Amino acid sequence: MDLGVGIKELVMVSNRLPVDRAVDEDGNVEWKTSPGGLVTAVEPIVQQLGCIWVGWPGDAGSEAMEPFDVDRMRLVPVSLSTEEVEEYYEGFSNGTLWPLYHDVIAQPEYHREWWDQYVKVNRRFAQTVAGQAAKGAVVWVHDYQLQLVPGMLRDLRPDLTIGFFLHIPFPARRLFAQLPWRRPIIQGILGADVIGFQTVHDAESFRECAETYAGAPTHGNLVMVSDALDNTRQVIAQEFPISIDTGQFAQMAADPDIQRRALEIRKEVGSPKKLLLGVDRLDYTKGIRHRLKAYGELLAEGEIDPEQIVLIQVATPSRERVDAYQLLRDQVEVTVGRINGDYGSLGHTPVVYLHQGFSREEMVALYLAADVAVVTALRDGMNLVAKEYVACRLDETGVLMLSEFAGARDELDEAILVNPHDIEGMKAAFLRSIHMPPREQKRRMAALRETVSQNDVAHWAANYLGSLAAISEQRSTVVDA
Ligand code: ADP
Ligand code: G6P
């Protein structure tokens, strides 16, 4: 992957490091790849460029840890106390911002103590970066957990070029308006030089909020930010749709061992005529309940034969201490149990439910095994699973069912689009996908593959980092002159 951007030093900052630290009962430390699309997308870039990566190692109450090296990355851990995990991470990040930014699918909670911890932890991240970054470095801050970091960092280190990328949706202004701390959040993000969003719509909503809550005029994709001395800075705020390392997925999909494993998977689930697949973090934004409802009704109505069709639902454990996630898990597991109890037989399970993480190889084998990938998010920044499925379908067979409310919808026109709230529409889409003739599959999948291979993660990173590099270059020319 050649990114072709001339950046001398890159510092990545995200809530989580790309690896998670887990300590077993005997005190042995194990590092595992962190969950979620952020790491999937960003990791291949830094594997190539090398970087310092500042983030939380994922366990509560860990004492201060020294930086350490993994491949071409220098990882700098930021520790969080138990209280900070509860109030900054589970509280403000995932109990306030996550539901608010995902169209209030769950009710956001607004607590002043959570906000105080958010400010405190954001400051710690900013100070850590300020202590690590070389003069004139490019710093790339990621996601909703760290929206104050760009502003704080600009105050601490005006020499840095700062990017901010929001991996999740940015809400419409009338929803964002609910947030008691809407002004400092907008001002914090505006500390960046380049602000990236997943879709045109997200970027538009942000620019409207910048005008309303920071009094910052906008011209096209530019936001004019004035400081106390009336100096004006131009900030780029636009869409940069994220993607995957398409080549790597395609290469894995061509691996004979992985192809063999795909055949094995089909046998293990009873050699169904059609295999459907859902892969999601167990998150209420992913529409897993809606998907199961539609599938269950089709079984109940005899529209699909439980002996011939299997749905594998991979539901990756996520944010397990947050109430809304515990409730969702209970609801999903009761529904899966009911469907299997009512329509299963000794030799056949209509829903194979897997609440666990898998290796990348196993994920690719699952994508290869599946005739239909089912993405029914109620709201999703992008949804990389949709792109991964497409990247793996080398023979141009298979059908992607895709929610209209996932960012990926803007690019993947040839998917079977669904409104997950419309259960009758979802049932029709399931039937259409299951029965789609091979020629139509091929036509649609070829077009989808073309899109995903053109706009891969290298393209995303080169565009985004290219904008940052240009600003960094300009700045160093001005300083040198
Ligand atoms: P999100 O970022 O909200 O989790 P995405 O679909 O954008 O959603 O990204 C999810 C990423 O996590 C994908 O790269 C997917 O392959 C990976 N993933 C999801 N579930 C698992 C799992 N159980 N085991 C391993 N990887 C997983
Ligand atoms: C999404 C978010 C990431 C987050 C990931 C996993 O992809 O955009 O910022 O890291 O989910 O969630 P977690 O709360 O486990 O970090």
Image (cartoon, helix red, strand yellow):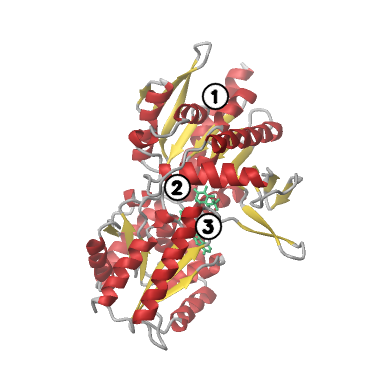
Label of residue 474 in the image = 1
The mark found on residue 242 in the picture is 2
Q: Nearer the viewer, residue 397 or 4?
A: 397
Looking at marks 2 and 1 on the same chain, the residue that comes earlier in the sequence is marked by: 2
Residue at the outermost top position: 229
Q: CA distance from mark 3 to mark 1?
A: 42 Å
Task: Specify whether tag 2 is near ligand 1 (CB below 8 Å).
Answer: no
Front position in the image: 58 or 192:
58
Q: Which disc number belongs to residue 318?
A: 3
Residue at mark 1: C-beta within 8 A of ligand 2: no
Q: Quadrant of residue 202?
A: top left
Please state if 354 lies on the left or on the right of 62 as rendered.
left
Q: Is residue 131 above or below residue 320?
A: above
Q: Amino acid at mark 2?
A: Ile
State the image quarter where residue 422 is shown: bottom left
User: Taking the image as drawn, is residue 144 in sight?
Assistant: yes
